Image: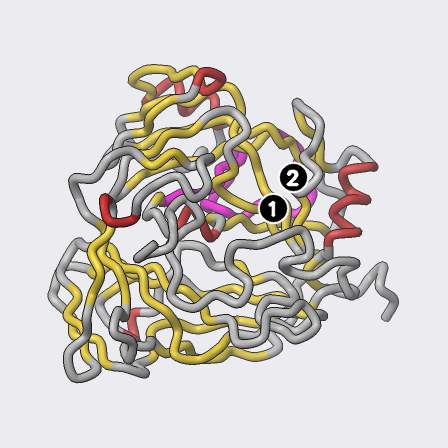
């Protein structure tokens, strides 16, 4: 089977070819670092709407549904604060005209999940969040629901990413991910009454104003209902250069909590070839209705590996990354803990 017909995740050079051919278009020029090894960062457009309820478009366009549920409009060109506990719909700059055989799936970026901002992609007549059907032609939108912190965003802010695929790639393997509760500080819990996080300000926030460090006892940690935690995987994560992976966000069999809002791992993450050997997976954990005791090494998520159609011309971290060779690490918006 040739690389032109092989099912799999599209690498960066294929994404760039789609952009060059007009299958992915934008209201403004694409940023130089917008195409990742096996995904495309999506950027906020000029407008957002505070809505009274989330929705799926069904047979309608997203714009038609926004008219039914919008409370007020926000101008993102001047920057806007999105309040925790509220739901917003924003237009994205990227528009799709996918060729036959090509579909897509979206997920929050790592930095988005690590500040507990829940986001989902919407498309016209879409029957599911985050999934873009084969051959879809139309605009893209994003639902944004800050959970722990209010956040400042603006036109061009990148909250989610798109992974494009040809056909139905096989699942190569599924690996269990355990949690590491051995360190002096084993994790962080979000402070509920913190200030605003500027999502375009790197290293611009004192983590002590937003996070509480957690010290485990006897290799255990008690998760309180409704709280948000940053933890690290027990095992190092390695994504081979011809593969990509997604961490499954919900697995009821492993406990009463939700793990990992940002599920995409690009090829090269944690590999020697990309100078990232020993990288841990950072876990974004929200406990559900009941208190839950985590134990060191306990399985908390699954990693699903799929093949790429061909080797990407660049690997994770080649354009710079805040998370290659990471251990327990807060999002890029915060200074290093203790400095």
Residue farthest to the front, as pictured: 339
- Can you tell which quarter of the image residue 296 is in? bottom left
- Can you tell which quarter of the image residue 193 is in? top left
Mark 2 lies on a secondary structure that is: loop
Relative to residue 42, is residue 326 drawn left or right?
left
Mark 1 lies on a secondary structure that is: loop
Tell me the residue at 37%/69% (across/down). Answer: 232
The stretch drawn in magenta includes residue 119: yes
Relative to residue 164, is residue 155 drawn left or right?
left
* Display colour scheme: secondary structure
Tell me the residue at 70%/72% (across/down). Answer: 273
Of 324 and 51, the residue lying toward us: 324
Up/down of 108 relative to 272, above or below:
above
Up/down of 134 relative to 78, above or below:
below
The stretch drawn in magenta includes residue 171: no
The numbered disc on residue 153 is: none
Callout 1 environment at 10 Å: few (<14), some (14 to 19), or many (20+)?
Answer: some
Residue farthest to the right, as pictured: 2
Relative to residue 39, is residue 257 drawn left or right?
left
Which region shows up in magenta? 118-138
Q: Tell me if label 2 and label 1 are in contact, CB under 8 Å.
A: yes
Relative to residue 265, is residue 205 drawn left or right?
left
From the top left corner, tell me how far across and down residue 150 is, in percent.
28, 34
Of 164 and 317, the residue lying toward us: 317
The numbered disc on residue 133 is: 1
From the top left corner, tell me how far across and down residue 339 is, in percent.
34, 54
The numbered disc on residue 136 is: 2
Up/down of 45 relative to 23, above or below:
above
From the top left corner, tell me how far across and down residue 164 is, in percent.
66, 51
């Amino acid at each position: 089977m040739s690389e032109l017909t092989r099912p799999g995740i599209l690498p960066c050079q294929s994404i760039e070819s789609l952009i060059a051919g007009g299958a992915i278009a934008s209201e403004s020029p694409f940023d130089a670092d917008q195409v990742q090894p096996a995904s495309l960062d999506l950027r906020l457009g000029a407008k957002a709407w505070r809505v009274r309820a989330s929705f799926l478009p069904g047979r309608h366009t997203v714009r038609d549904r926004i008219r039914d549920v919008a409370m007020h409009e926000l101008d993102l060109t001047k920057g806007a604060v999105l309040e925790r506990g509220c739901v917003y719909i924003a237009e994205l700059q990227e528009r799709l005209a996918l060729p036959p055989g090509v579909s897509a799936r979206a997920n929050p970026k790592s930095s988005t999940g690590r500040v507990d901002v829940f986001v989902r992609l919407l498309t016209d007549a879409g029957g599911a969040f985050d999934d873009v059907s084969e051959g879809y032609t139309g605009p893209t939108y994003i639902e944004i629901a800050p959970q722990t912190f209010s956040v400042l965003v603006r036109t061009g802010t990148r909250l989610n990413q798109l992974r494009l695929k040809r056909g139905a790639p096989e699942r190569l393997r599924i690996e269990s991910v355990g949690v590491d509760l051995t360190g002096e500080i084993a994790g962080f819990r979000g402070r509920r009454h913190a200030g605003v996080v500027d999502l375009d300000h790197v290293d611009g926030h004192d983590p002590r104003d937003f996070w509480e460090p957690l010290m485990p006892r006897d290799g255990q940690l008690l998760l309180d209902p409704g709280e948000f935690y940053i933890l690290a995987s027990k095992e190092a994560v390695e994504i081979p250069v011809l593969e990509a992976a997604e961490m499954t966000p919900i697995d009821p069999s492993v406990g009463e909590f939700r793990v990992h809002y940002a599920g995409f791992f690009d090829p090269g993450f944690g590999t020697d070839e990309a100078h990232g050997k020993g990288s841990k997976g950072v876990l974004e954990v929200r406990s559900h209705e009941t208190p839950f005791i985590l134990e060191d090494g306990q399985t908390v998520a699954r990693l699903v590996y799929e093949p790429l159609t061909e080797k990407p011309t660049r690997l994770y971290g080649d354009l710079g990354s805040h998370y290659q060779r990471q251990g327990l690490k807060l999002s890029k918006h915060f200074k290093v803990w203790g400095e």
